[in-house]
């Protein structure tokens, strides 16, 4: 999968579903692969790409070294969601709980209410994480299911407004 191929797959979907904030492709990356992923993203034109996480003061900082990461690696649309690119969603306990559930079950999982990395206002959001696998690959153990996610991001207020569009407030 390349960035261009990923964008081509998802860019036609967003206009049809205006309640969706963004789609992303989030691979599980082992620490020994980190440099490879960061270098590849820089070669793709993201000169300042690095794995990030939130600090104790809620600032985006370079992610601490750990055994593995689940990185926002491809994202569409990029323009308003740029801060999320490179974010290690496994660095946050609410997101990690959904990641663990998705990998353990091999099924769609969702986060609880979160503040999105790219949020500039005060809306909350949720992530819907769908594990992605290659065809004809065994998925009998949790380890075999630990690969990557397709992630749909919803801003809760925006999703509700979109769903209620066309309904009258009058009784």
Image (cartoon, rainbow, N blue to C red):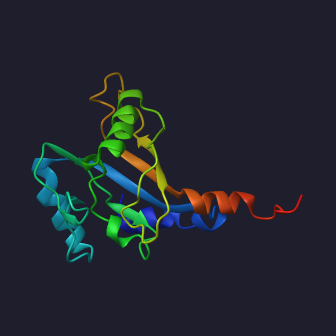
Give left or right: position of 119 versus 43: right
At x 25% / y 75%, what residue is drawn? Answer: 46
Q: Out of 163 and 107, give the one closest to the viewer.
A: 163
The outermost residue toward the front is: 171
Above or below: residue 102 compared with residue 128: above
Return the residue nearer the eye: 23 or 8: 23
Of 135 and 43, nearer the camera is 43
- Place of residue 15 in the rendered image (x, y in percent of width and height, measured from the top left): 62, 68
Q: Quadrant of the C terminus?
A: bottom right
Q: Is residue 5 visible?
A: no
Tell me what residue is drawn at x 24 percent, y 49 percent: 91
x and y, in percent, of residue 159 in the image: 61, 58
Total label count? Answer: 0
Residue 117 found in image quarter? bottom left
Q: Position of residue 59 (x, y in %)?
A: 24, 66
Residue 81, image x, y percentages: 41, 70
């Amino acid at each position: 999968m390349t960035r261009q191929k990923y964008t081509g797959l998802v860019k036609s979907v967003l206009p049809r579903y205006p309640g969706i904030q963004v789609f992303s492709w989030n691979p599980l990356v082992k620490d020994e692969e980190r440099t490879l992923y960061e270098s590849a993203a820089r070669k793709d034109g993201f000169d300042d790409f690095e794995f990030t996480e939130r600090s104790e003061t809620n600032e985006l900082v370079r992610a601490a070294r750990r055994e593995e990461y689940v990185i926002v690696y491809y994202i569409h649309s990029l323009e308003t969601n740029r801060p999320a690119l490179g974010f290690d969603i496994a660095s946050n306990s609410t997101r990690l709980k959904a990641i663990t559930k998705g990998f353990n079950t091999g099924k769609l999982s969702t986060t609880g209410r979160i503040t999105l990395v790219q949020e500039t206002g005060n809306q909350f959001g949720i992530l819907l994480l769908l594990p992605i696998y290659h065809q004809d690959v065994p998925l009998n153990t949790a380890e075999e299911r630990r690969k990557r996610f397709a992630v749909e991001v919803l801003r809760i207020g925006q999703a509700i407004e979109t769903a209620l569009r066309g309904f009258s407030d009058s009784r």
